Image (tube, coloured by chain):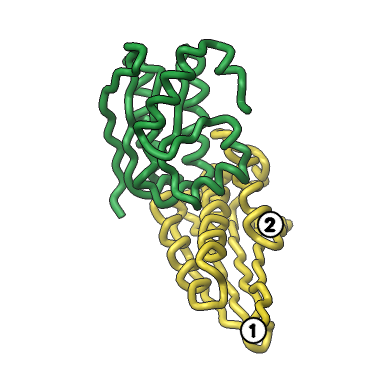
Chain colours: A yellow, B green
Amino acid sequence: MDQQSDVVELRIPRKPEFVSVARLAVSGIAGRMDFSYDEVEDIKLAVGEACTAAMTDAAPGSAAVPITIRCESGADRISIDVVDPAAGGRGGKSEQGDEPISRLLMEVLMDEVDVREDADGAVSLRMTKFVARDEE
Amino acid sequence: MDFSVTTRDATLANGQRAAIAHVVGEVDVYTAPRLKDRLLQLERDSVHSIVVDLTEVGFIDSVGLGVLIGGLRRARAGGGTVVLAGPNPRIRRILDITGLSGAFTVAPDVDAALDALAKEVSGGQAAAQGGS
């Protein structure tokens, strides 16, 4: 995948109104690939969930730190990293109680979900969806 | 797409007060608070039997679902319930994945939702405990 993959990187302000921008951008990329309409919608929802989680889990004083969405599209898959440089180790907690639903949706809608926490407090959530093989 | 929530009064077949919340647009982390405000306002007005009309909702995320769950919980506490009307197949799928199609009564349109609401509310507390 590495040789042929295209990378699009988007940085959005940590503001709820920009989550839809991330959703639109990623669904635009997925829409150019061999995913079905439903699969593109799945990816769109999962990306929104990841961005929302990053915003609601923000550490105090991190309002000015943007969230990075890195989208890598190859022949057989799309991988999206949602990187929150200021997660503040709040993973798992949510005031609104929507965290379990959010995580469940990402796990069900994407093929792989992996969360990585760096020593400096950055949390990176990587999601991958593979293009279904369709023999003709 | 613009987001809006408008509410209107309704009277159930059994004469009980109800409200229909007509939602238009995408319900996500940005817009869901507006839906929440409307549902809270209905609660303050002592309206606990509510149809949330999703016919014109193209997208809902976990925050939006959380608002619906909160509305359902408060409505049940007040002796009523929330019925969802007209979700598109995508939203139905999300309700299934999250198990919420077991918690909510989902009707194909507003009229069917009002009928379901009348049945559930007149069914009393037993219906509120259900979930099947």
Chain letter of disc 1 in the image:
A
Q: Is residue A82 left or right of residue B83?
A: right
Residue situated in front as seen by the camera: B124 or A113:
B124
Quarter in which the C terminus of chain A is drawn: bottom right
Residue type at numbered disc 2: Asp
Note whether residue B65 is visible. yes
Q: Residue at x 40, y 25 (%)?
A: B115
Q: CA distance from mark 1 to mark 2?
A: 48 Å
Q: Is residue A52 left or right of residue B45?
A: right
Amino acid at the residue labelled 1: Glu
| Vertical arrangement, residue A14 with respect to residue B42, above or below | below
Looking at the picture, do discs 1 and 2 lie on one chain? yes
Q: Secondary structure at mark 2?
A: loop
Which of the two residues, B32 or B85, is positioned nearer the viewer here? Answer: B85
Crowding at mark 2 (Cα within 10 Å: few <14, some 14-19, many 20+): few
Residue at numbered disc 2: A120
- Residue B47: give x, y in percent of width and height: 36, 17
Marks 1 and 2, the one that precedes in the sequence? 2
Q: Residue furthest bottom?
A: A3
One can see residue A59 in this view: no
Q: Which residue is mark 1?
A: A136
For the point 56% across and 69% down, which residue is it?
A: A70
Q: Position of residue B131 (x, y in %)?
A: 61, 26
